[in-house]
Amino acid sequence: MSAPLLSRVYEGGAGAVVTKSVGPRPRMGHPNPTVVAVEGGLLNAMGLPNPGAGYFTGEIERLKEAGVPVVGSFFGASVEEFVEVARTLAGVGVDALELNCSCPNVEEEMGLLGSDPANVERITGAVKEAVNLPVFVKLTPNVADIVEIARAAERGGADAITAVNTLKALAIDVDLRRPVLSNTTGGLSGPALKPVALRCVWEIAECVDIPIIGVGGVSGWRDAVEFLLCGASVVEIGTAVMTRGFEVFREVAEGIRGYLAQNGFKEVREIVGLAHEA
Ligand code: SIN
């Protein structure tokens, strides 16, 4: 994702931008088709295509020159690769890092790093030791117990949990009589993911003390308020940019402000996790 496109997200009213995940080397990703619209959202199996952290630093520098707060999303296939990329991104002034150990579309090559609490703790700990930046750990919902993984990230020193990445899913082409995506499976995002993501945020909020960034199906301010009431302190928006355009960020921010004012709250933090107290 280029600097001009990410700048439009910021100009659209987002508080910060999260980059597409970058790894240590350029990756082509999976062959087409990599995206298909399904009921209630999108399935994607991009396969982490990216130009490599070294090249991507130029895009981050452009964003920083324009005054855009940047969260650098990154991945690796080993602890060493995570550390290497984290250092590269930190070196060009990202404001925070989002450690992506949860992509459902690269299991064959990279295994299930984010499904193993010991891995998550080890990678998080190594990255935190290597850089002096806030690190958010993005979790997969494709596990039996997401709380166990969230606790591992917290033990590793994560500053926040991002919940959640996409839900592993499948679409079939009835004419071709085979899966639509070249990777067979893909990750489900958009409104259909929201109830799953809310459940994950809810469970994590009951068990960890660090902040939660809610993501999964936020298309309007009501969705965002649901995440906040569940225990998220911040929300991320992705798929809705395709359906609602860059204006979605301003609409959501203004909608949250309106909700707070109408209900006698002054700040977002007053409603974070409020549904747990009901
Ligand atoms: C992809 O590139 O396949 C999606 C990225 C992700 O789900 O982390």
Image (cartoon, rainbow, N blue to C red):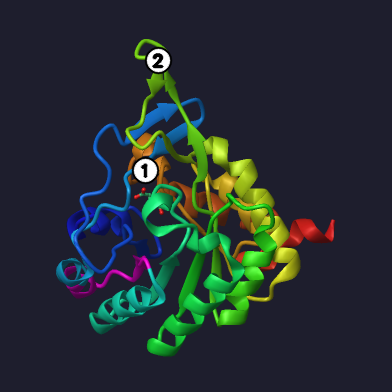
Determine the residue positioned at 49% across, 47% down.
166
Q: Residue at x 43, y 68 (%)?
A: 99
Q: Is residue 70 above or below residue 246?
A: below
Q: Earlier in the sequence, mark 2 or mark 1?
A: 2
Q: Name which residue type carries label 1.
A: Val
The x, y position of residue 199, in whole percent, is 69, 50
Q: Which mark is residue 241?
A: 1
Q: Does residue 62 show up magenta in the picture?
A: yes
Q: Nearer the viewer, residue 233 or 147?
A: 147
Residue 137 appears left or right of 141? left
* Of 190 and 118, the residue lying toward us: 118
Image x and y of residue 194, in percent: 58, 43
For the point 61% across and 62% down, the residue is 232
**Mark 2, residue position:** 177
Q: Is residue 28 magenta?
A: no
Q: Quadrant of the C terminus?
A: bottom right
* Secondary element type, mark 1: helix
As drawn, 57 above or below 20: below
Stretch in magenta = 61-77
Give the amino acid type for the residue marked by disc 2 in the picture.
Answer: Arg
Residue 224 percent location from the top left of the image: 57, 51
How would you rate the neighbour count of disc 1 (Cα within 10 Å): few for under 14, some for 14-19, many for 20 or more? some
Looking at the image, how many numbered discs can be counted on the residues?
2
Disc 2 Cβ-to-ligand 1 distance below 8 Å: no
Q: CA distance from mark 2 to mark 1?
A: 31 Å
